[in-house]
Amino acid sequence: MTAADAILSYTVWLAFAVLAAAFLLTVWRVVRGPTLPDRVVALDMLTGIVIGFIALIAIRTGFTLYIDIAISLGLVGFLATVAFARFVLSRGTGGGAPRENPAAALLAAAPVKRRKPAARRTGGTGPAVRRKARK
């Protein structure tokens, strides 16, 4: 074993230990999170930590198919986070006065230009006017 292999091996094991600690702390946040948005962010973080584990396994084994699995998990995890965020937005605060929607607040602040109504023409040359003129 060369020095580079030894350094890589120790670094991978150190990264496993750091990711394991992050995994445990994030699971604690999912279980004990005071609010639903905290839990959603923790679940998104869990996805990132699992992607890190998969990448370390790919480095350790040299099997590059794991990288494709990690990319797929990243895409699915992103979609799950978006779905959870939409659920949290639709649920509101859960009690008391509903929170103001930030997008609605931005749109309400922008002035709306209104067009003046076009004056109605009394005469015209359209087909209905020509039919009336023939009668």
Image: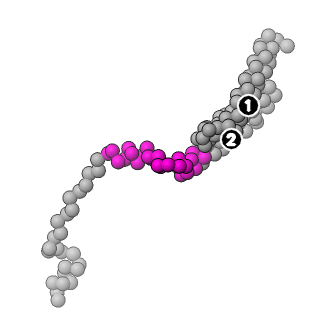
How dense is the environment of label 2, judged by Cα within 10 Å: few (below 14), some, or many (20 and up)?
Answer: few
Closest to the observer, 15 or 96? 96
In the image, is 45 to the left or to the right of 95?
Answer: right
Which residue carries the number 2 mark?
A: 72
* Residue pictured at 39% horizontal, 45% vertical: 105
Q: Earlier in the sequence, mark 1 or mark 2?
A: 1
Q: Quadrant of the N terminus?
A: top right
* Residue pictured at 64% horizontal, 37% vertical: 33
Q: Looking at numbered disc 2 in the image, what kind of residue is underneath it?
A: Ser
The x, y position of residue 32, in whole percent, is: 68, 37
Range of magenta residues:
84-110
The x, y position of residue 24, in whole percent, is: 73, 31
Q: Is residue 12 visible?
A: no
How dense is the environment of label 1, judged by Cα within 10 Å: few (below 14), some, or many (20 and up)?
Answer: few
Which numbered disc covers residue 24? 1
Q: Quadrant of residue 126?
A: bottom left
* Residue pictured at 21% horizontal, 62% vertical: 117
Against 35, residue 16 (above or below) is above
Q: Which element carries disc 1, helix, strand or loop?
A: helix
In the image, is 134 to the left or to the right of 75?
Answer: left
Q: Looking at numbered disc 1 in the image, what kind of residue is underneath it?
A: Leu
The x, y position of residue 135, in whole percent, is: 17, 89
Q: Is residue 108 magenta?
A: yes
